[in-house]
Image: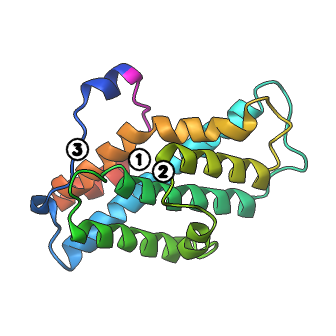
Amino acid sequence: MDTVDTPAASERREFFVVRETHRPQQGQDLGARALFLTAGLGILCSRLLKLYLDHCESDGKKAEPAIKMEEYTACVKELLSISIWLVLFEQIGNDVPEWFKDFTVNCHSIADKVQPQPTAKDIQSRYALGSPIADICMQLSINLCMQLRLGATTNDAMLYLGELVLRAKPERNELLEFALTQPLTSLDERIKQS
């Protein structure tokens, strides 16, 4: 989960489309698969935010005042919540099964249990989730740039994170495919290796 897909690798990989046959069984199977996807996306989001911070500090400027751990974790949670929505939105147009919408809501519930504030509902209210994906990513980037006070660090600070999030689509899709198609023991093993 901590490798970054190169454009060449992501172009070769076929996009995974959720079908009725991928529906998890109720109970432990459903919970474990939602937990895996949420954890995997959380790891991805933390890495993307670190790449963003590194980029903004690449010319030697640091955000003032220093970013507090609570601010960082709140930003990871916001990035995670939007990433969960993106997993759903990236399936739109593929006749998304109704159960999959509920599955993503379950992922939000798990994220709220792990990091209660801000809630997924609070985060959702800040975004026009009916907008095109690129617009959502741009708004996310602007919001987090302002929250972390990074606007003066680089010329592209307001938009850079949005570009990273857009480019992470193959990784989100691969995590989704793994979550819905692999045996539960493989999910556990992959999380342990992260």
Q: In the figure, 126 relative to 27: above or below? A: above
Question: 78 or 73, which is in the foreground?
Answer: 78
Specify few, some or many for label 1: CA neighbours under 10 Å numbering under 14, 14-19, or 20 or more: few
The spot of residue 143 in percent (x, y) is 70, 53
Of badges 3 and 1, nearer the viewer stands 3
Dot 2 falls on a residue whose secondary structure is helix
Do labels 2 and 3 touch, CB within 8 Å? no
Question: Mark 3 is on which residue type?
Answer: Phe
* Quadrant in the picture for residue 107: bottom left
Farthest right residue? 65
Residue projecting furthest to the left:
21
Which of discs 2 and 3 lies nearer the camera? The answer is 3
Q: Where residue 43 is drawn, which disc sits there?
A: 2
Residue at the farthest top position: 8
| Residue 28 position (above or below residue 88) | below
Q: Residue 167 in the image: state x and y as whole percent.
A: 47, 34
| Secondary structure of the residue carrying numbered label 3 | loop
Q: Earlier in the sequence, mark 2 or mark 3?
A: 3
In the displayed structure image, the side of residue 104 where residue 26 appears, left or right = left
Verify CB contact (< 8 Å) between mark 3 and mark 1.
Answer: no
- Look at the image and give the residue range highlighted in magenta: 1-7
In the rendered image, which quarter contains the N terminus? Answer: top left
Q: Which residue has dot 3 on it?
A: 16
How far apart are labels 1 and 2 at the CA level?
8 Å
What whole-number distance in Å separates the C-alpha atoms at marks 3 and 1? 22 Å
Give the residue type that dot 1 points to: Ser
Location of mark 1 (residue): 194
Identify the disc placed on residue 46: none
